[in-house]
Amino acid sequence: MAECGLIASDILRGAGLDPRRWCGLAMGMGLDHALMLRKAIPDIRLLRSEDPRVAAQMLDLSPWRPVSMMPPMRRDLSLVCSADVDRETLGDAARMALGQAAEVLESLEVLAVSPLAELPAEVVTRLGLRSGQANFLVRLNLQALDRTLTITEANVLRDQVYLALHEGPYTELISG
């Protein structure tokens, strides 16, 4: 981890010091490598990454969570759900619905919630909203760690999440 040695004569001369009169120690602590070991980070370049998903992990000592460098696929869903459901519950239900494929669900974002009382009558009818329900606009960010997802794969995953979360009488599936 740490290393230490005599300062090279060229370094002393470069600093304007006569190496016959001066000597010193050079020391490196290897803090980058210590952090890599502590967090199990596989590549030193990640320590200086500007990717927000990577940078956020450098703020504490919790174990490294791999971040995909593959292109993301986004799918927006219009869902009818209980008005009091929270983001964590939706995310947990989505991951359960995806089973082993849940590893590609990078995030589930609730973009908007429109309670029944705030929606026009035509929209309430089209969605089949009932008392105590709301329309949720949800974005799925799908991203595999090791490969690019196909459009078909993303659509199938979207439909699995939709069927698990949507509580309305009408369904809108896109995978065919």
Image (spheres, rainbow, N blue to C red):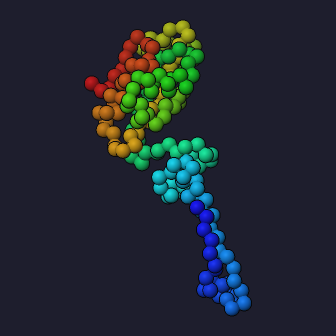
Q: What residue is at 56 percent from the left and 10 percent from the top?
A: 132
Depth check, front residue: 166 or 17: 17
The relative height of residue 86 versus residue 148 in the rendered view (above or below) is above
Query: Looking at the rendering, in which quadrant would you find the C terminus?
Result: top left
Considering every residue shown, the one lying at the far top of the view is 131
- Farthest-out residue, right: 21
Visible in this render: residue 49? no
> Toward the viewer: 163 or 172?
163
Q: Residue at 50% x, 58% y: name it.
A: 45
Identify the residue at image location x=34%, y=43%.
148
In percent of width and height, residue 122 lies at 46, 14
**Is 67 situated left or right of 62 in this image?**
left
Residue 105 visible from this viewpoint: yes
* Badge count: 0
Q: Residue at x 66, y 84 (%)?
A: 12
Between residue 118 and residue 11, name the one nearer to us: 11
Q: Is residue 67 left or right of residue 157?
A: right
Picture coordinates of residue 143, whole percent (x, y): 40, 39
Percent position (x, y) of residue 115? 56, 17
Residue 76 picture quarter:
top left
Quadrant assignment for the N terminus: bottom right
Residue 116 point in image, percent of width and height: 54, 14
